[in-house]
Image (tube, helix red, strand yellow):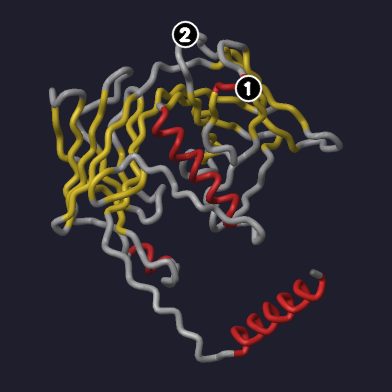
């Protein structure tokens, strides 16, 4: 048995050495079909916002120029509420808070609790669509700053809220440093299931999330003197599944000894992928003194 294991090990090492020393190794990976990628949301009391791009090959060059080239500026994006009671075509606008700095925005339909919203994107003969809902909002009971051990200025924000027992709830929390951050950034924990505190009072510690999960680690602490806006959101199950699977994929990609056999759970149908999500959003401002 030991001799067999030894021979197999030698064969594996020989195969690895052969592959590594072969300069002529070519991988013929087919180009993917063009797919519409939706990153859109609508929240309580606000107009819809949609970032629209197309997909790119896995081994393509990633830089600012190539990312700009992925933006679908000539697409048609249509928003319909509930059972087709009202419809509007979103307008493409420049917004330097995002990169690439182009975003489709609504002008007529305002997000409301309990309604169903459908987004449809059309480009180059392809069509992608998705549905989402805006759940009832849940309010924070309190939010306060807590210093890190052995630090005189850095810390985290603790929040407390009571999870409604009558319905299943999912949450997403974003923060923005007022006067510093261009937009709201997600926590490292991208979505939260109430499975561990259903119908109870919950307490969470918030660290500062990075502006980009792929380009920067960011500073995970808040500090004395910061003014922080907290965006506390309820989301539906499909919206939770997307961010939960996206988080798993992100963490696995950072670990050379881990891999994922699952796909990110998109709620987009047709010739597309990505996420169209509703937020029951509440905003709070905390001045850290």
Which is closer to the viewer, label 1 or label 2? 2
Q: Farthest residue to the front: give it.
A: 1
Answer with mark 1 or mark 2, whichever residue precedes in sequence.
1
At mark 2, the secondary structure is loop
**CA distance separating discs 1 and 2:** 22 Å
* Left or right of residue 225, residue 270 in this image: left
Is residue 165 placed above or below 57 in the rendered structure? above
Q: Residue at x 15, y 34 (%)?
A: 88
- Numbered-mark total: 2
- Residue 133 image point, x, y percent: 32, 26
* Left or right of residue 36, residue 182 in this image: right
Is the N terminus in the top left, top right, bottom left or bottom right quadrant?
Answer: bottom right
Q: Residues within 10 Å of mark 2 (few under 14, many from 20)?
A: few
Is residue 152 placed above or below 35 in the rendered structure? above
Q: Farthest residue to the top: give it.
A: 166
Q: Residue at x 38, y 20 (%)?
A: 135
Is residue 33 placed above or below 26 in the rendered structure? above
- Residue 129 image point, x, y percent: 23, 42
Residue 261 versus residue 90: which sits nearer the camera? 261
Q: Quadrant of residue 146?
A: top right
Is the C terminus in the top left, top right, bottom left or bottom right quadrant?
Answer: top right
Residue 186 versus residue 250: which sits nearer the camera? 250
Q: Which numbered dot is residue 159?
A: 1
Residue 2 versus residue 78: which sits nearer the camera? 2
Residue 224 versus residue 154: which sits nearer the camera? 154
- Residue 49 image point, x, y percent: 31, 39
* Left or right of residue 106, residue 162 in this image: right
Q: Residue at x 58, y 56 (%)?
A: 259
Q: Residue at x 48, y 20 (%)?
A: 169
Identify the residue under disc 2.
166
């Amino acid at each position: 048995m030991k001799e067999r294991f030894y021979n197999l090990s030698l064969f594996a090492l020989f195969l690895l050495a052969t592959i590594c020393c072969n300069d002529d190794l070519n991988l013929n990976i087919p180009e993917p079909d063009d797919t519409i990628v939706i990153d859109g949301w609508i929240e309580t009391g606000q107009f819809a916002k949609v970032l629209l791009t197309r997909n790119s090959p896995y081994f393509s060059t990633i830089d600012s120029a190539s990312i700009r080239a992925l933006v679908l500026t000539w697409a048609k994006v249509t928003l319909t509420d509930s059972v087709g009671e009202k419809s509007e075509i979103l307008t493409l606008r420049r917004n330097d808070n995002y990169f690439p700095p182009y975003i489709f925005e609504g002008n007529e339909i305002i997000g409301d609790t309990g309604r169903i919203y459908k987004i449809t994107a059309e480009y180059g003969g392809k069509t992608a669509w998705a549905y989402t809902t805006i759940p009832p909002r849940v309010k924070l009971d309190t939010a306060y700053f807590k210093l890190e051990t052995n630090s005189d200025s850095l810390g985290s924000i603790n929040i407390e809220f009571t999870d409604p027992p009558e319905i299943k709830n999912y949450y997403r929390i974003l923060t923005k440093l007022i006067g510093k951050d261009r937009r709201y950034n997600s926590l490292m924990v991208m979505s939260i299931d109430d499975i561990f505190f259903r119908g109870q009072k919950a307490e969470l510690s918030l660290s500062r999330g990075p502006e980009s999960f792929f380009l920067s680690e960011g500073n995970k602490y808040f500090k004395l003197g910061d003014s922080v806006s907290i965006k506390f959101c309820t989301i539906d199950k499909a919206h939770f599944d997307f961010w939960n699977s996206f988080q798993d994929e992100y963490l696995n990609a950072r670990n050379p000894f881990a891999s994922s056999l699952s796909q990110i759970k998109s709620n987009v149908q047709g010739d597309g992928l990505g996420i169209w999500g509703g937020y029951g959003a509440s905003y709070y401002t905390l001045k850290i003194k």
